Amino acid sequence: MHIETITPADPAWQGQALCAQTGADFFFPEPGSSVREAKRICALCEIRPACLDYALAHDERFGVWGGLSERERLALRRTAR
Ligand code: SF4
């Protein structure tokens, strides 16, 4: 299965995304695989808050966005309600 890396509408955002330099494999791992490496990269990414906002606003269900896994974003959405 191939999943594209993050491609938000704003190209300036893309240019700063560390994941664009590493490829999508870390960020969209096979089910049950570790997301530790993706989170490590996100922790170094300057646009992490904007990325997380984007993922929450667009209801991104898969992969690591803004340093949070699918489960973590779901939990965040539930606590925000
Ligand atoms: S926070 Fe993570 S997923 Fe978001 S753009 Fe940066 S490296 Fe990519």
Image (spheres, grey):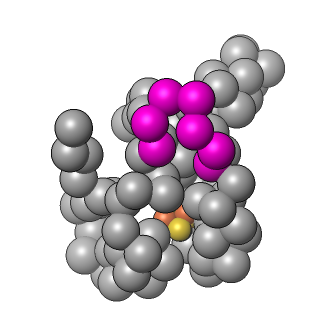
Bounds of the magenta segment: 29-35
Residue 65, placed above or below residue 14: above
- Magenta segment, prevailing SS (helix, strand or loop): loop
Q: Quadrant of residue 74?
A: top right
Residue 37, placed above or below residue 27: below
Residue 14, placed above or below residue 65: below
**How far across and how far down the image is residue 29, in percent?**
46, 44
Residue at x-position 63% and y-position 32%? 73
Residue at x-position 64% and y-position 62%? 37
Location of the N terminus by quadrant is top left
Residue lying at the far right in this picture: please name it.
79
Location of the C terminus by quadrant is top right
Q: Nearer the viewer, residue 8 or 29?
A: 29
Judge from the rendering whether residue 58 lies leftward or rightward of residue 69; answer left or right: left
**How far across and how far down the image is residue 5, in percent?**
30, 58
Please tell me how many numbered marks the rendered image carries.
0
Residue at x-position 71% and y-position 16%? 78
Residue 79, placed above or below residue 11: above
Residue at x-position 62% and y-position 79%? 46
Q: Is residue 13 visible?
A: no
Q: For residue 61: magenta?
A: no
**How far across and how far down the image is residue 21, in percent?**
39, 81
Q: Is residue 24 visible?
A: yes
Q: Quadrant of residue 14?
A: bottom left
Q: Quadrant of residue 76?
A: top right
Judge from the rendering whether residue 81 lies leftward or rightward of residue 50; answer left or right: right
